[in-house]
Amino acid sequence: MKAEDKLKELGIALPEVTKPLAAYAPYVRSGNLLFISGTLPMVEGRLLATGTVGREVDLEEANRCARTCAINMLAVLKSAIGDLDRTIRIVKLTGYVASDPGFSHQPKVVDGASVLLCEVFGERGVHSRAAVGVASLPLGCPVELEMIAEVEAGSK
C-alpha cells in the first residue's frame, strides 16, 4: 500500500511545514540521505503539551507527542521529495525526552513515532534509534525528534 494511502487509512492529514524556530533548515539532503532537523509536537502552531515527562506529562501523552512529531517529520519529508513513496527507508530516528530524574521509559515514549513510521512504510519504516532523556527542550516541550531517511535519487 502506498504511504499516503496508509496515512489516509489512519485518518492522518499531513500539516503544512512550519518555519524553523531559529537559524537552521528543516532538512538537509546529502546524496540520497535526507536529514530532518529536530521536530516538535506542534499542532496548528501550538505545542501538543508542555512539561517534563514523569512530572507534568504522563507516558501516554508523551507517546502521543512523539507520534505528532513523526507526523510533522513526514510533512517535511514529503515537502523535500514530493512523494512519500520515494522513500527507500527510514534509517535512523533520534528521540529526546524531557524527563523527570526518576523517569526511565524514554524508549516507550519514542515508540509513538517508531510505530507510526512502521505503519506508514511497512518494512521500509524499520529503523535504528536512540531515545535519550534530557533536562529540558525548546519551548518547554516534552519530546523532540530528528530523523534520517534514505530517498530515491533525483526525487524532487
Image: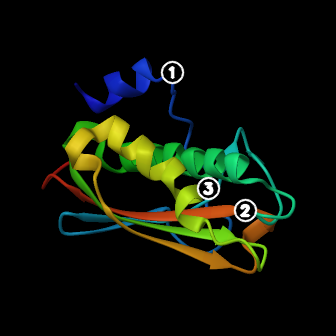
Q: Toward the viewer: 62 or 150?
A: 62
Residue in the foreground of this view, choosing between 48 and 111: 111
Q: Position of 24 compared to 123: left or right?
A: right
List x then y, in percent, for residue 29. Answer: 30, 66
Badge 1: residue crowd in 10 Å (few <14, some 14–19, many ≥20):
few
Of the numbered discs 2 and 1, the one sitting upstream in the chain is 1
User: Do the residues bearing badges 2 and 3 touch, measured as CB atoms within 8 Å?
Assistant: no
Element type where label 1 sits in the image: loop
Callout 3 touching callout 1 (CB < 8 Å): no
Q: Residue 142, which numbered label?
A: 2
Relative placement, left or right, of 131 versus 79 is right
Of labels 3 and 1, earlier in sequence is: 1
Q: Residues within 10 Å of mark 2 (few under 14, many from 20)?
A: many
Q: Horizontal and vertical percent for residue 80?
A: 35, 51
- Dot 3 falls on a residue whose secondary structure is loop
The residue tagged with tag 2: helix, strand or loop? loop
Q: Is residue 44 above or below residue 25?
A: above
Query: Which dot marks residue 11?
Result: 1
Q: Amino acid at mark 3?
A: Lys
Q: Residue at x 43, y 45 (%)?
A: 115
Viewer-nearest of labels 3 and 1?
A: 1
Per the model, the C-alpha gap separating discs 2 and 1 is 24 Å
Q: Amino acid at mark 2?
A: Pro
Amino acid at pointer 1? Gly
Q: Residue at x 61, y 65 (%)?
A: 105
Q: Earlier in the sequence, mark 2 or mark 3?
A: 3
**Residue position marked by numbered label 3 in the rendering:** 19
Instruction: Tell us which disc is closer to us: 2 or 3.
Output: 2
**Residue nearer the viewer, 102 or 85:** 102
The answer to whether 9 is drawn above or below residue 63 in the figure is above
Quick one: quadrant of the N terminus?
Answer: top left
Q: Is residue 139 above or below residue 117?
A: below
